[in-house]
Image: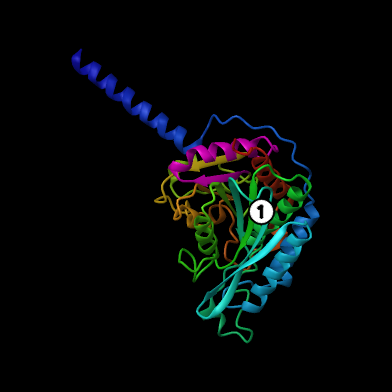
Amino acid sequence: MWLAKRILVFVGVVAGLLLLAYAVLTQPLVQPTSSKAPPIDVDKLRSHVRMLSEQLYPRSFDQRQTLDAAASYVHAQLATTGAAVEDQVFTVNGETYRNVIARFGPQDGPLLVIGAHYDSDGDQARGASFPLGYDLSTHTPGADDNASGVAGLLELARLLSRAPPRVGVELVAFTLEEEPNFQTETMGSVQHARHVRASGRKVEVMISLEMIGYFSDEQRSQSFPFPVLGFIYPSRGDFIAIVGRVQDWSATRKVKAGMLGASDLPVYSINASSIVPGIDFSDHGSYWDQGFPALMITDTAFYRNPNYHQAGDVARTLDYGRMAKVVQGVFGVIQSYAPAH
């Protein structure tokens, strides 16, 4: 009898811990924060993606002329919204690069940072064997990665110009997220995160829009870093994901609630250690390093999109209707933040 009781207690403790881990990992009981997000111009999203992935190809670290032209395009598009727009210029190996920043709402008090990198992946060493220094086999068009995120940022700016937020918002188009700068001090997001830290302004949350355009309704179109996650999350890549650390649990709940309440797009979340491959694979990691809560909104990149860093990452492969719902979700999140009293 004594042994049986001990076994029951042990089983109960293990079950409780597993349930707690599941709740922390997936945020299953988040209630939507209802909002009325304005319609998104799907054609504008497509136009932005095509401009960046076709006319401004390639946007890689080694192709400075088109990379800078992409920055100019983003700056001009943001300026049309009436926002205060500026370039954050910095130097890497004697060359200048720039983030593009648009500001909305109060210029002091709490701040939301929404960012997306406008550069794309390219292999300079392999590209050198081609006359132009690049080829589709060495430099991706980068439609999903990450023209999609930038297009979302530009349309988000249009919405904010018509419905000013109650808290400060900085929309930032980052440069130098891809290799050879990835997870180094030369990333554009590192420069911006340090600038915000130096300003002393409180950051409620930073959100990185990292690949938001590829969806699939096919069974088993979604994969995972660990097979066990396949028992928790859908096997179809028809959802958008919110990714963060365990300590960003509260921020994840608020962002997830805002996104769920803005459209009918399925939204899933994960809060886990960076030991899980992909948890820190974008610009949000730069803000963790500065002590800020930060999340990634993503279609899960290479866990779903077979064109990741390939020649096939082109505009026609994206789902602009569902991408629009992602933008509506982020707008809903912004509107859910009220100023501090």
Q: Is residue 172 visible?
A: yes
Q: Secondary structure at mark 1?
A: loop
Q: Is residue 17 left or right of residue 22?
A: left
Residue toward you, 151 or 303:
151
Q: Is residue 233 visible?
A: no
How would you rate the neighbour count of disc 1 (Cα within 10 Å): few for under 14, some for 14-19, many for 20 or more? many
Q: Is residue 18 left or right of residue 56?
A: left
- Three-letter code for the amino acid on which mark 1 is drawn: Gly
Toward which corner of the image does residue 52 lie, by quadrant?
bottom right
> Does 242 lie within the magenta span?
yes
Residue toward you, 204 or 198:
198
Q: Residue furthest bottom?
A: 131
- In the image, what residue occupies the spot 76% across and 50% down? 161
- In the image, what residue occupies the spot 44% across and 34% down? 22
Toward which corner of the image does residue 264 lie, by quadrant?
top right
Report the quarter where the C terminus lies.
Answer: top right
Colour setup of the view = rainbow
> Does 160 lie within the magenta span?
no
- In the image, what residue occupies the spot 56% across and 51% down? 300
Report the quarter where the N terminus lies.
Answer: top left
Q: Position of residue 219 (x, y in %)?
A: 60, 44
- In the image, what residue occupies the spot 79% across and 56% down? 44
Q: Position of residue 62 (x, y in %)?
A: 57, 78
Q: Position of residue 213 (x, y in %)?
A: 66, 53
Q: Position of residue 311 (x, y in %)?
A: 62, 68
Q: Which residue lies under the disc numbered 1?
A: 213
- Look at the picture and state if 260 lies above or below 85: above
- Look at the picture and state if 88 lies above or below 246: below
Magenta extent? 239-265
Q: Residue furthest top?
A: 1
